[in-house]
Image (tube, helix red, strand yellow):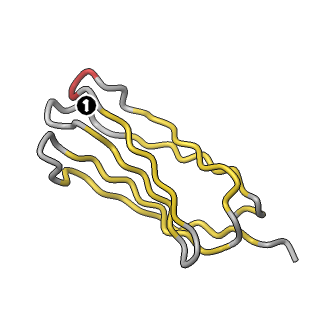
Amino acid sequence: MAFEPANVRIQTHIEADPQNRSMEVVAESEEFYTRSVVDIDGENAPTVDTFYFRNLPAGSYEVSAIVRDAGGGERAFDRCVLIVSSGR
């Protein structure tokens, strides 16, 4: 839980794998959407990556992380819920 405008840090952990080519992290509420995509260098990629979403307005967010292969296929998926309160 956080208060708006929220600066959120998402830390991901993935196993190094030659087929991993990108990671997409999305934060989505009914009224707001943001995403970040980074390339992954397979087995040479770091196992921990950090994403920052700044100034998120109040809302209930589904935050998801998706690891994709070279063809765009989904290799791994995880999600959580983040609540940003208006503080009122």
Looking at this view, name the residue that lies furthest to the top.
44
Q: Nearer the viewer, residue 27 or 44?
A: 27
Q: Nearer the viewer, residue 48 or 8?
A: 8
Residue 18 in percent (x, y) is at 15, 30
- Tell how many labels: 1
Work out which quarter of the rendered image holds the C terminus and state it: bottom right
Residue under label 1: 16
Q: Residue at x 55, y 69 (%)?
A: 61
User: How would you rate the neighbour count of disc 1 (Cα within 10 Å): few for under 14, some for 14-19, many for 20 or more?
Assistant: some
Residue 15 in percent (x, y) is at 28, 36
Residue 78 in percent (x, y) is at 36, 59
Q: Where, by quadrant of the figure, is residue 70 drawn?
A: top left
**Amino acid at dot 1:** Ala
Q: From what the image shows, is residue 85 above or below residue 22?
A: below
Work out which quarter of the rendered image holds the N terminus and state it: bottom right
Residue 71 in percent (x, y) is at 11, 45
